[in-house]
Amino acid sequence: MFGPLSLAALNHLLNQADWARAKLLPFAGRRARLAMPPFQLDFAIREDGYVEASTETPDVVMTLPADAPLRALQGQEQVIAAARVEGNAHLATELSFVLRNLRWDAEEDLSRVVGDIAAHRLVQGANVVAGWQKSAARNLAENVAEYLSEENPLVARPQDLASHVGELAELRDKLSQLEKRVHKLSL
């Protein structure tokens, strides 16, 4: 069930992005696998730039770590950095570019159901709510970090660590001097 739905969603996004299909056209007939254990999606690029299910050996395999959804909370770059790619490098580069830059035009889809003005307002409202949630999540994370470092110091503050490192370096130097004095006295 995961495969057909994913392919339909990917083709829907490709339908909204002529540039993406144009990028994929030179790779018509090539096969790819996107994997994020325990899920995997095998597909082939068609002559028209869309994708279809494939059971043949892929030309490129792009594997995301199982914790990719958690990494995505830190930013898309974190997910990309953790990805492993095997196979045709040129295909992997172009496919990666397309997948990173595909965006759902929700307003276009909604306008077919509720009309242009209502769709525009719904998307604007959703963007405001999403911005508020992002801001609330950032504020929560900052407050938890402040609590753990200031109120209930379970986590050391950077300035405390720097001070401690300085004190340790000073102690190491004094210990070295003491060892030299002891060595001179023993001779």
Image (cartoon, helix red, strand yellow):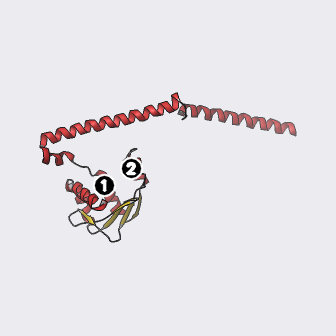
Q: Nearer the viewer, residue 116 or 91?
A: 116
Residue name at image x 65 percent, y 32 percent? 167
Q: Name the quadrant containing residue 140.
A: top left
Which amino acid is tagged 1? Answer: Leu
Q: Which residue is mark 1?
A: 99
Residue at the front extreme, as displayed: 1
Circle 2 packing at 10 Å, graded few (<14), some (14-19), many (20+), is some
Q: Is residue 82 left or right of residue 151?
A: left
Label 1 to label 2: alpha-carbon separation: 16 Å
| SS at badge 2 | helix
| SS at badge 1 | helix
Residue name at image x 16 percent, y 42 percent? 119
Q: Which residue is mark 2?
A: 69
Which amino acid is tagged 2? Answer: Pro
Which label sits on residue 73?
A: none
Q: Nearer the viewer, mark 1 or mark 2?
A: 2
Residue name at image x 21 percent, y 41 percent? 123
